[in-house]
Amino acid sequence: MSTGIPSSARPAGWARLPRRWLGAWRRWSLWVLLGALVAGVLVTLVWLAGRYEASQVQERLERDAMDAAADLRRALARDLQDMLALPGGADGILAWQGQANELLSRRPELVRLEWRDEQQRVRAEAGIPTQQDTAHSEAAMACANARRLMAPSYSASYYHLLPGGTGAELMEMCAPLVEAGRVRGYLVGTYSLQALLADVVGPQLQRTQGVSFTEADGTRLARVAAQRRGSRMFTAQQLFDLPGNTLVLRMDGWHAAPSVFPNVLTALVTAMSIALVSVLLVLVRDTRRRLRAERDLAEALAFRKAMEDSLVTGLRARDLHGHVTYVNPAFCAMVGFPAAELVGRAAPMPYWPPELTEEYSGRQERRLAGRLGPSSAGYETSFVRSDGSRFPVMVYEAPLINAHGVHTGWMGCILDVSEQRRAEELSRTTHERLQATARLATVGEMASLLSHELNQPLAAIASYATGSLNLLTPLPGSAPDAHDLHEVQVAVQRIAHQAERAGRVIKSVHDFVRRRPHTRETVPAQELLDAVLPIIRLQARKLAVQVAVEIAPGLPPVLCDRTMVEQVLLNLTRNAMQAMDEQEGAAARLLQLQVRRAPAGGPWLEFSVADNGSGIPEDVAARLFTPFYTTRTEGMGLGLSLCRTVVEQHGGHLAWLARQPRGTVFVFTLPGDGQSGPSN
């Protein structure tokens, strides 16, 4: 087997080596060469991967530096617009200072603002003082350059000492205020380069990045350092050219050494990585769904809590065994007990009246057993506050059903009706007082009529009494004969009749004026009219009005409050007679009172009061039942409103109709015996 090496070219020592050793060396050299080639390929791949990673890091850093420079330019342009928007004018110094201070609070990179006139004298200023020659010279140069360019100009940076031994690198910006083509003043803004980097670029920096302003020779002026450093540093620079000044924006990025796994190891873990990534994606999706559900649940709970806390209605939840599981703040404030003292309690409850504990316990047992009627039906009861005071409440309860449709307890809605009852009592008392006032006003108007009506029976009584005395006083020495005694007896009977007549008039007025308890009773329609007819006829005789009464036969008695209905009849008849009194030239004034069954059927009765007066105009009809509205100078405007309220409290209805050929008819309905309206 030839080795491929000419015998003349073999070294002298090789001739003495065994042939098999030469073959082994050849094979091992090939394996070493193959291994070196593979190692070289792997090293090259690692080097190329590192170079690629470094180029990617450098490109990202270059893009970040460009973005940072763009952000700085936008920030300076935004600040310039805000400064030019400050108010000017001769009288705007205070407004300028106020808005300048507000602008400085919103723009931390600005440390000072000055408003100068055309001679660069300071008219107004805001911010920290920078009373240094350097500051004045840099600002003056910037303003001179701005006047030349007729545009904003920036000065070179300078170092300014601050209180406390610290300092900052500052830069001046001067913008001319041009009016009608001439410079009328300047706006000078002082920038802190450190604050400019920290507030504009700092929030966008990564933890491994740092940014700084440098001069052209590399002198660092301001810097925002990286929070974390790696083994390699990458640098990108951007020329930050400003009118009048040029700075270099330098961005440093720290990165760990590039590490690339061999392809074989990557191939081995690729499948596992794909599986892990898939599982991770599934977990991320489920986590996001769970977080969304938790967020929605938290929002729903917060909304429900805010809604329950804002309610003035008490809420109370009980389980199937009668233990309180929840009370809202309104219920705790209502009864005066804290939630910790109520939750978990069972019967008897601390807010139950002691003497009604057995009754309330039985009602709770019936409720828990479902034998208390429909859940929507409420019931009124009394609770006791922690201070011992009692108050009425309305309780509405409904079953509590959980998410699985299982009945787990009862939810109660408790309303404090003490204010409602107090308002109802006040309304009732006020109504009674208004009614009594109306009756007294009516009696006052009838005082003259009453005196005229009583004059007749009183005059007759006086005449009969004088005649009787004359008959009972005979001539001296003679005795009264039988005829005189008979005449005296007739006179005394007529005196009694006239006295009874006067008494009836006075009694009818007295019964009408005095306050009686408001209770419902069955009263025949004839008695209602008889109670007020004497008073009606008093005014009718004065106004020359004829009164006609018609009551249908077979009517059931009226179930009403007698005093209130009498007031309604009197008010309507008085209005009717006054309406006829205003009508001049009428041939006959006729007031018709009629009682019959209501056309709608049932035991309802219909009362009507008709006149032949001038009727009701359209503009008055629209406000006829409005309280305190009247067309008479002496009226109170409460009569018709009071009448409608009384009728509606009895469950009836009051309306009016135009009468043909003239006049008005007022009609109202009242319940007969067996058809009760709502109670007072």
Image (spheres, rainbow, N blue to C red):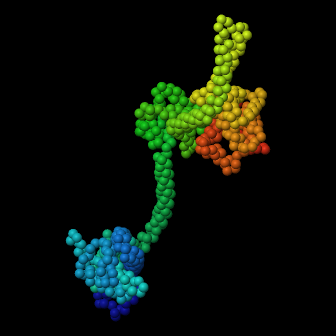
Judge whether residue 664 can be spotted in this image. no
Rendered position, 445 above or below 628: above
Q: Position of residue 493 (x, y in %)?
A: 69, 16
Viewer-nearest residue: 634 or 463: 463
Viewer-nearest residue: 443 or 315: 443
Q: Residue furthest front?
A: 476
Tally of marks: 0
Q: Residue furthest bottom?
A: 8
Snapshot quadrant of residue 451: top right
Rendered position, 318 above or below 292: above
Snapshot quadrant of residue 525: top right
Q: Position of residue 545 (x, y in %)?
A: 72, 36
Give the side of residue 267 with respect to residue 134, left or right: right
Q: Residue at x 68, y 34 (%)?
A: 542
Quadrant where the N terminus sits is bottom left
Q: Position of residue 112 (x, y in %)?
A: 31, 74
Snapshot quadrant of residue 156: bottom left
Rendered position, 71 above or below 7: above
Give the side of residue 312 with respect to residue 466, left or right: left
Judge whether residue 472 can be spotted in this image. yes
Q: Position of residue 367 (x, y in %)?
A: 56, 33
Q: Residue at x 76, y 31 (%)?
A: 550
Quadrant where the C terminus sits is top right
Q: Residue at x 47, y 42 (%)?
A: 330
Q: Residue at x 46, y 46 (%)?
A: 309
Viewer-nearest residue: 141 or 539: 539
